[in-house]
Image: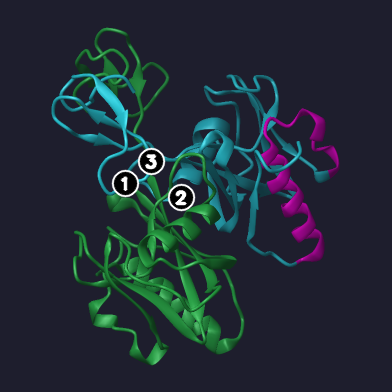
Chain colours: A green, B cyan
Amino acid sequence: MKYCPECGAPVSLCIPSGDHLPRSVCTRCGAIHYQNPKLVVGAIAEWDERILLCRRAIEPCLGRWTLPAGFMENGETTAEAAVRETLEEACATIALDDIFALIDLPHISQVHVFYRAHLLTPTFGPGEESLDVALVSPADIPWEQLAFRTVTLALRHYLADRESRQWTFHHDSVGWLVPS
Amino acid sequence: MKYCPECGAPVSLCIPSGDHLPRSVCTRCGAIHYQNPKLVVGAIAEWDERILLCRRAIEPCLGRWTLPAGFMENGETTAEAAVRETLEEACATIALDDIFALIDLPHISQVHVFYRAHLLTPTFGPGEESLDVALVSPADIPWEQLAFRTVTLALRHYLADRESRQWTFHHDSVGWLVPS
C-alpha cells in the first residue's frame, strides 16, 4: 500500500501508539490501514465414492488438479463460500456434510478451510477458472499433479478417515516450518 | 475504499470481466482491490479448573467480559495468534491444547476461531486493551456481562464438552439467520 484508500494521500509505515507492528498510516488523515490473512474455502465433494477435482485454467499452478476452492467473500459464511466456489469452478451443486479441515499457511498469510460434501446430481463441468472437471476414484487421484500442498493434505486426511469410517476435524500448518 | 492504494487515483465500483461481484477498480491503473473477511482468534485458557477472562478497556463492549482474542496478523498461524492475543490482553503465557471452535459471522464479515489452552503459570494481568483479568470458575462466569455472542457460544460448548469429558470441534454461524 502506497496511498491512503480513504483520502488518496501517501501512507508511511510506522507503529501506531499502543500497537506493536508497523502499519500503513496516512500522512494526511491519520487513518491506520491493517492488512490481515485471507481465508480460502473449498469442498471435498463425492459422488458414488469418487471425488470432484478441477484442473486449473489459471495461475498459479495452471494445468494442475485441485479441489474446488477460492477466496471467501465478505458477507458470506465459510459454508456458503464452499458451495459457491464448487458451483463456479466445477458447475456442480453440492450439499455440505461437515467442516473437515483448517490449514494455516503463514508464509502467504492464508488459512484454508475444507468441507466434506456430496454432489446432489452427477452434473458438472469446467467453470471459467477450470480447464477440466472430473469425478476421480481414490486410486486414480493424480497425486503428482495436484496444485497445492493443502489439497494434498486434505485429500490424505479424507481418504484415511473414510477408510477408518471415522470422520474427525483436522488442523495443520504448512509453510516455513515444514519441509516441502 | 475511495482511492487506489497502489497509485492514489480514484477507484470506481464495477464488476471486472469474469467476476460476479462489484469490486473497487482503479480508474487509472486498473488494479482490482478485493475485500475479504477477517479472522479473529482467541483462547479458552484454564488454570486449576478456572477460565481466563478479560474485561474490555476498549469499544466495542467496553466494560464487558471476553475471552482473550483479536485480529490475526499477516505472517502468523491461528495458533500463534491465540498465544499472542492472550499475552497482549491478559499478560498470560499459555500452551495450546487443540483447536476448538470456528464460528462464522457473515453480517460483519468475520470468522472467529478459538483454541483450548492452559496457563503455564498462574500469572496474569490487564494488558493495554483490558481493564481487568481474572481466572473464573464455571459457576461464576458472568454470562449476562459477556461481550460477544461468539464468546458465549464457545464457553457453552467448552463447559458441555468438559462436563462430558469428550472434546470435539464445534462449528457455528451467528448473525443474520440466527435470532439473538
Let me know if marks 2 and 3 both belong to one chain: yes
Kind of residue sitting beneath label 1 = Asp
Cα distance in 3D space between marks 1 and 2: 30 Å
- Name the residue: 32% across, 63% down: A127
> Does residue B147 belong to the magenta stretch?
yes
Residue B101, quarter of the rendered image? bottom right
Kind of residue sitting beneath label 2 = Thr
For disc 2, the marked residue is B78
The vertical placement of A11 against B157, above or below, is: above
Q: Chain of mark 3?
A: B
- Name the residue: 50% across, 32% down: B88
Front position in the image: A57 or A13: A57
The quadrant the C terminus of chain A occupies is: bottom left
The nearer-to-camera label among 1 and 2 is 1
The quadrant the N terminus of chain A occupies is: top left
The first of marks 2 and 3 along the sequence is 3
For the record, the magenta segment spans B139-165
Let me know if marks 3 and 1 both belong to one chain: yes
Q: Position of residue A52 (x, y in %)?
A: 41, 76
Which mark identifies residue B21? 3
The vertical placement of A39 against A16, above or below, is: below
For disc 1, the marked residue is B19
Q: Position of residue B160 (x, y in %)?
A: 79, 56
Q: Chain of mark 1?
A: B
> Does A88 sit left or right of B156 as displayed?
left
Count the marks.
3
Front position in the image: A95 or B144: A95
Cα distance in 3D space between marks 2 and 3: 28 Å
Residues at badges 3 and 1 in contact (C-beta under 8 Å)?
yes
Q: Position of residue A111 (x, y in %)?
A: 40, 53
